[in-house]
Image: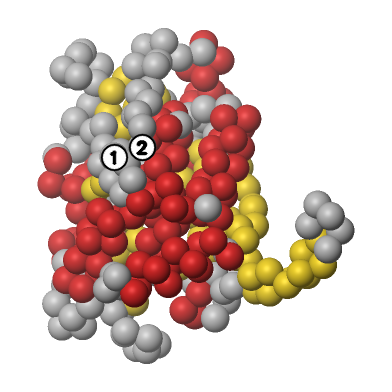
Amino acid sequence: MRRRFGDRKDGYKLRKADPFFRIIPYLMKERSDAQVFFEDRVYLEETDKLIRQLRKEGHAVGFLHIVIASMVRVISQRPKINRFVVGKKTYARKEISFSIAIKKDMSEDTEETTIKIIFEPTDTIYNVIQKVNKQINDNKNTEDKNSTDKAAKFFSIMPGFLINWSLNFIRFLDAHGKLPRFLTDLSPFHSSIFITDLGSLGIKGVYHHIYNIGTNTIFLAFGTKTKEQYIDEENNITIKKSMDIKVVVDERVVDGYYFAKSIKLAKRIMAKPRQLLLPPNEVIIDNEI
């Protein structure tokens, strides 16, 4: 789709949106004003089977890859969750991008870093494994710093008033669609979804706030797996492994019903992920651009 007046480098302006959603950003000016919290539970029997199969095939894969691939698939089918609000206007994002916080190694003294990965709506679990593992491996060296780390270091050496002025200037440029592409490329706050995996820390998922800076609309967190008694449709009691996912969204981009159905779809895909072995039959385009 060619760029039209009012579009941004990273998004298409919505031109057919519900009038109510055009005024919502003026009523709730910050993402923190518009946060909605979702929680759901994923049963992992089929998920674990697929992970074991992929590992036998030689793939380094875990639940993180399943979560990411599932959310990529959800965006390909329900593209309205891949919108963002900035400068009190709503845009459909041009790409699917994920920011992921990782530890370079499991030591308290080791710095955390953030990686950002671009996906295609047709990506399968194999594509996701390849892209995620490459980025993680490239950033595991504790001596090296990626572009995001270098930018954070640059700002950290400034005096406080200059940090404040610089970030306000960045917000101003972003609100008017003038933020340079190299800054949006390195910024973890300009992405479709921010994901954190807390399982390696031995804790359950938490509700993580979304940031007022940038264009990130969704924050998804998950943690340790648990086993619980499960009663099936025939009243048989079994033990099932499960994991809770917690999602915080900016409700200004689309109504809560649409978000809720999207989270339910994500849950179904994570629980029965074999469909991720193949690309989607079709990719749905946001119909309000």
Which image quarter is the N terminus in?
Answer: top left
Colouring method of the image = secondary structure
Q: Is residue 122 above or below residue 188?
A: above
Q: Is residue 226 left or right of residue 88?
A: right
> Residue at label 2?
280
Q: Is residue 228 above or below residue 211?
A: below
Instruction: Looking at the picture, tell me which residue is in the foreground, 85 or 267.
Output: 267
Residue at (50, 74) in percent of width and height: 199
Mark 1 residue element: loop
* Dot placed on the residue nearer the N-terminal end, 2 or 1: 1
> Residue at label 1?
122
Q: Is residue 164 left or right of residue 53?
A: left
Asked if the residue at tag 1 contacts the one at tag 2, i.e. Cβ–Cβ closer than 8 Å, the answer is yes
Residue 237 seen in the current view: yes
Which image quarter is the C terminus in?
Answer: top left
Residue at (52, 53) in percent of width and height: 272
Q: What amino acid does circle 1 point to? A: Thr
Q: Residues within 10 Å of mark 1 (few under 14, many from 20)?
A: some
Q: Which mark is residue 219?
A: none
Q: What amino acid does circle 2 point to? A: Pro
Residue at (39, 54) in percent of width and height: 68
